Image (cartoon, rainbow, N blue to C red):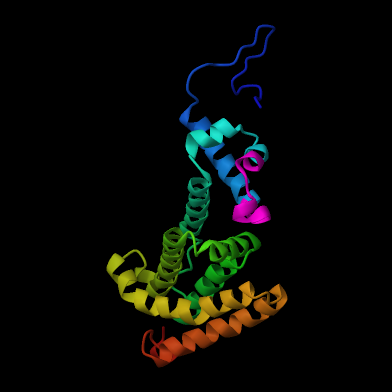
Amino acid sequence: MFRLGEGWQVGTSAKPRVGRPSSKDAGEVDARILRAATDVFLARGYDGATFEAIAAAAGASKATLYARYPGKPDLFAAVIRANVEVALVPAADVPGDLPLRERLTRAGRAVISEAMAPVPLALMRLFIAEAPRQRDLIREADALGRRAGIRRIAEAIAGPDRDDPAAVARAEPAAAQFINLAFVPHQMRALLGDEAADLRKDLEGRIAVAIDALEAAGLVPTRSDGT
């Protein structure tokens, strides 16, 4: 559907522009298709999703979809990668001058809460369902998402040195353990259907236990070190 200013000129002899769409217009179509595909895949599952339904939801033609994605596996892969890229966008910085425990608490709360939102959680359920036949793709998505979470926690550990790649790299082993101790069990409880209110209530305690474990293992400084 055209809007005034997007391919049509006001007047009695208005004609659409011809030729290739601009990169901006093409980008907007791509984004609209991926949003619609995400909604349809989540609503119908992989097997129930069709190009007809996705095209209708996107306000596009099937030809437009096929020009970009030869088949449903290609579109599903694009949906996964697009949604993983959202997780790769850095969140608001945690102030580096806060005590380490507070930095870890804030960063952990943000990373876990974002992943427990309805759409990411529903996508994770879909990923799990499709893992047997989309194994490599799901592994790629999981690895990208995990690396994004580890990096954000590592930056919180690095604190004032978060812009130093070496400092962030040194913090990544501790960050990986934090993800294992706090994020993974919390996500599992959410996937198994625990109530959102119960999950929110448990989150702070889960993060505190994870930080205690990192301190006990010597992976991060303890509070007595003044960090």
Q: Is residue 47 magenta?
A: yes
Q: Main secondary structure of the magenta part?
A: helix
Residue 25, x across and y down, in percent: 53, 31
**Quadrant of the image for the C terminus?**
bottom left
In front here: 127 or 223?
Answer: 127
Q: Is residue 57 magenta?
A: no
Residue 79, x across and y down, in percent: 53, 50
> Which residues are drawn in magenta?
41-54
Q: Is residue 166 left or right of residue 93?
A: left
| Residue at x 48%, y 46% (from the top left corner) | 74
**Quadrant of the image for the N terminus?**
top right
In front here: 72 or 103?
Answer: 72
Residue 69, x across and y down, in percent: 49, 40
Question: Which corner quadrant of the image does residue 156 belong to?
Answer: bottom left
Q: In this view, does 114 lie to the left or right of 221?
A: right
In front here: 120 or 134?
Answer: 134
Residue 214, x across and y down, in percent: 42, 86
In front here: 31 or 114?
Answer: 31
- Residue that sits furthest to the left in the current view: 166
Res 211 visible: yes
